[in-house]
C-alpha cells in the first residue's frame, strides 16, 4: 500500500535535495531552511506519535524549528534565487525541437492523479489496496508526479539528477513563501486553542440588532468574510461564525433554511479568501511563482470579483433562506 | 470572556499592513495570542509544533516541482507561448474564460487537483495569457504583463473556489453537514451542494465580464487597465 508516510518521505527527499544543492552553492541560510523542513517532513509521523504518547519534547523541538525558520526568512539570510534567464537560446531551440511533446508530461500530473483517484476503490486485491481507503487523493497525486517525472525525463532526455536540480532551483525561487501556507494553518490552530474565535463571535453578537433579519444576514456574511480574512481559511471561520450568528439568530430565531445559509455562508467566506494575504497558497505563492513584482498582485486582480460576488451572495442568502 | 487573545489578530493585521516578513508576522502573532491566553512558553512551542506538523498537506506542491522544472528547462513556456500566438482565433478573454469554465466543471466533479498555480498556471496558462494579450496589445509593457499574469492566477482561484463546492464529497460540504448534525440539524450533502450552484453561475458571469473589460483596457492602450 502507498501509505501517506511514503508521500511525506518523497517530499522530504525533494526538500533535502534543495538543502544539498544550496550547501554546495554556499547559500547557508537556504540550506539550513530546507534541511529543517525536510527533517520535519521525514520525522513528522513519529513526532505526532510521540506527542500522542505524551512525550512533548519532539513537538516542542518542531516549535523551535518553526521559530528558527521564521527568523531565517525574516532576517534576510535566505536569498531568493534570481530567475535564471541564462540559457534562453537553448530553451528556445529545445522548444522548437520537442514541440507538443512537452505538453505530455505536464498534463500527465492531473490526468494520472485523476484516473488513479477514480480507480482507487477498484485497486484492491483481497486485503491489499494500493491507496489508503480514507484519503486516496494525496497518494494519487504523489504517484501521478512520479509517473510524470519518468515521462518528462524520457521526453527531455535529461539525467534524473537534473529533475532534483530543477526542483531545487524552483524552491530557491519560491523561497519561504512555499512554507507560509503551512505556518498559517498552524496559526489557525493556535488561534483556535487560545480562544480567539470565541472572542470574535462574542463581540459581533453584542453589536448587531438581533430582531432584524437583514441585519443578521449581513452581519453573518460580513463576519464570514472578515474572519476568513483573518484566519486565511473559510473552514476555520465557518464553525465560529455559524455557531455564533447563523445558528442562534438566522436559523433558530428567524427560521431560515439551514442548507441555504450553510452553503452560501461558506461561499461568502471564500470571497474573503480571495482578499487576504493570509490565504498564502492561493494568493501569495502564485504571485511568487509567476515572478510578480507586487506580492499582492493576485489579490488586486481578485478584489473586484470578490466584492461583487460577496454582495451577490449575501443578497442570495437573504432571498433564498427566507423563501 | 478573555478578549486579550484578540491581540494576536491585531498583530497579524498590523504586520501585514506594515509589510513585514509574513513568516515573522505569523509566528509573532501566535506568541502574542498565546501569552495573552496565559500559556507558558513550553506549552506554546508544543502547540505551534504540533499544529505545524499536522498541516503538512499544503506543501505537497513541492512534488510537482521536478516535473515543472524539467519541462521549463526544456522550453515548455516558450512552446506554449508560440502555440497560442499561432492560433489566430485565440484571444485573452477566450482563453481565460474557457479555462475558468473547465476548472469550475471539473471542480464540481471533484477533480480539483487538475490545475493549480504550480501545475498549470506557471507552466501553461500564464505564458499562454501573455501570448494572447500580445495579440490585443502588441507592445505589452511590463506593468500590463504583470497584470495579465496576475489575472491568470486570479482566474484559476475563482474557477477552483466556486466549482468545488458543488461536489458533494468535497470537504466544505461535509464540514457544513457535520457542523449541523452536531447541532441537531440533519441534512443531506446534496441539499447543501445544490445551493452552491447560483453562486457558481454568478462567479462565472462576474469574473468573465471582468476578463472582457481587462482585455478592452489592453486594447485601448491605457497603461493600467482597471479591470
Image (cartoon, coloured by chain):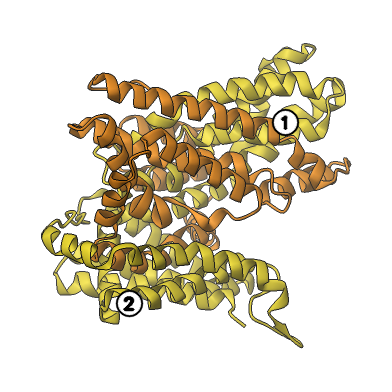
Chain colours: A yellow, B orange
Q: Give how far across and how far down residue A34 sits, in percent.
A: 31, 66
* Element type where label 1 sits in the image: helix
* Mark 2 surroundings: few (<14), some (14-19) or many (≥20) residues within 10 A: many
Query: Is B76 rendered above or below residue A237?
Result: below
Identity of the residue drawn at 67% across and 38% down: A238
Q: Give how far across and how far down residue B91 sits, in percent.
A: 37, 36
Identity of the residue drawn at 57% across and 53% down: B112
Of all chains, the one bearing label 1 is A
Identity of the residue drawn at 65% across and 47% down: B108
| Residue at the disc numbered 2 | A153
Q: Marks 1 and 2: CB-CB under 8 Å?
A: no
Identity of the residue drawn at 62% across and 83% down: A1
| Residue at the disc numbered 1 | A244
Comparing B124 with A321, the one in front is B124
Of all chains, the one bearing label 2 is A
Query: Is B47 rendered above or below residue A261?
Result: below
Comparing B52 with A88, the one in front is A88
Quarter of the image for residue A28 reads: bottom left
Quadrant of the snapshot with the C terminus of chain A:
top right
B132 vs A23, left or right, is right
Comparing A25 with B4, the one in front is A25
Q: Which mark is residue B26?
A: none
Q: How far apart are labels 1 and 2 at the CA level?
A: 53 Å
Q: Is residue A134 visible?
A: yes
Q: How many marks?
A: 2
* Element type where label 2 sits in the image: helix
Q: Is residue B32 visible?
A: no
Amino acid at each position: 500500500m502507498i501509505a501517506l508516510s511514503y508521500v511525506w518521505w518523497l517530499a522530504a527527499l525533494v526538500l533535502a535535495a534543495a538543502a544539498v544543492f544550496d550547501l554546495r552553492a554556499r547559500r547557508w541560510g537556504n540550506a539550513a531552511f530546507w534541511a529543517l523542513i525536510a527533517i520535519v517532513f521525514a520525522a513528522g509521523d513519529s513526532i505526532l506519535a510521540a506527542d500522542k504518547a505524551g512525550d512533548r519534547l519532539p513537538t516542542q523541538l518542531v516549535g523551535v524549528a518553526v521559530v528558527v525558520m521564521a527568523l531565517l526568512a525574516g532576517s534576510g539570510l535566505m536569498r531568493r534565487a534570481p530567475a535564471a534567464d541564462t540559457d534562453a537560446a537553448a530553451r528556445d531551440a529545445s522548444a522548437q525541437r520537442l514541440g507538443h511533446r512537452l505538453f505530455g508530461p505536464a498534463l500527465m500530473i492531473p490526468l494520472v492523479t485523476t484516473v488513479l483517484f477514480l480507480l482507487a476503490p477498484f485497486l484492491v486485491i483481497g486485503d491489499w489496496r494500493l491507496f489508503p481507503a480514507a484519503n486516496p487523493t494525496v497518494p494519487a497525486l504523489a504517484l501521478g508526479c512520479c509517473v510524470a517525472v519518468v515521462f518528462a525525463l524520457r521526453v527531455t532526455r535529461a539525467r534524473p539528477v537534473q529533475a532534483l536540480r530543477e526542483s531545487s532551483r524552483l524552491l530557491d525561487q519560491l523561497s519561504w513563501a512555499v512554507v507560509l501556507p503551512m505556518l498559517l494553518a498552524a496559526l489557525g490552530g493556535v488561534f483556535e486553542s487560545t480562544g480567539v474565535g470565541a472572542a470574535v463571535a462574542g463581540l459581533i453578537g453584542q453589536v448587531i440588532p438581533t430582531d432584524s433579519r437583514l441585519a443578521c444576514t449581513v452581519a453573518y456574511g460580513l463576519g464570514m468574510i472578515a474572519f476568513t480574512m483573518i484566519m486565511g481559511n473559510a473552514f476555520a471561520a465557518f464553525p465560529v461564525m455559524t455557531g455564533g450568528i447563523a445558528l442562534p439568530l438566522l436559523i433558530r430565531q428567524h427560521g431560515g433554511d439551514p442548507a441555504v445559509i450553510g452553503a452560501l455562508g461558506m461561499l461568502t467566506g471564500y470571497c474573503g479568501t480571495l482578499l487576504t494575504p493570509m490565504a498564502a497558497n492561493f494568493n501569495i505563492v502564485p504571485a511568487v511563482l509567476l515572478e510578480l513584482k507586487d506580492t499582492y498582485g493576485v489579490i488586486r486582480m481578485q478584489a473586484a470579483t470578490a466584492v461583487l460576488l460577496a454582495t451577490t451572495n449575501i443578497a442570495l442568502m437573504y432571498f433564498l433562506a427566507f423563501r | 470572556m478573555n478578549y486579550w487573545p484578540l491581540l494576536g489578530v491585531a498583530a497579524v493585521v498590523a504586520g501585514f499592513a506594515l509589510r513585514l516578513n509574513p513568516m515573522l508576522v505569523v509566528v509573532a502573532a501566535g506568541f502574542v495570542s498565546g501569552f495573552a491566553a496565559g500559556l507558558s512558553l513550553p506549552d506554546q512551542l508544543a502547540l505551534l509544533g504540533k499544529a505545524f506538523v499536522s498541516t503538512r498537506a499544503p506543501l505537497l506542491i513541492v512534488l510537482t516541482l521536478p516535473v515543472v522544472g524539467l519541462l521549463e528547462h526544456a522550453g515548455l513556456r516558450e512552446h506554449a507561448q508560440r502555440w497560442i500566438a499561432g492560433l489566430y482565433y485565440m484571444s485573452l478573454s477566450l482563453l481565460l474564460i474557457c479555462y475558468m469554465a473547465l476548472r469550475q466543471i471539473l471542480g464540481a466533479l471533484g477533480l480539483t487537483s487538475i490545475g493549480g498555480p504550480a501545475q498549470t498556471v506557471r507552466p501553461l496558462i500564464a505564458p499562454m495569457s501573455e501570448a494572447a494579450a500580445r495579440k490585443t496589445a502588441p507592445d505589452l509593457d511590463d506593468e500590463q504583463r504583470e497584470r495579465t499574469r496576475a489575472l491568470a492566477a486570479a482566474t484559476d482561484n475563482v474557477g477552483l473556489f466556486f466549482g468545488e463546492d458543488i461536489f458533494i464529497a468535497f470537504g466544505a460540504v461535509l464540514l457544513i453537514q457535520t457542523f449541523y448534525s452536531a447541532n441537531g440539524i440533519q441534512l443531506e450533502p446534496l441539499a447543501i451542494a445544490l445551493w452552491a450552484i447560483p453562486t457558481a453561475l454568478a462567479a462565472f458571469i462576474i469574473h468573465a465580464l471582468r476578463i472582457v473589460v481587462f482585455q478592452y483596457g489592453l486594447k485601448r492602450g491605457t497603461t493600467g487597465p482597471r479591470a
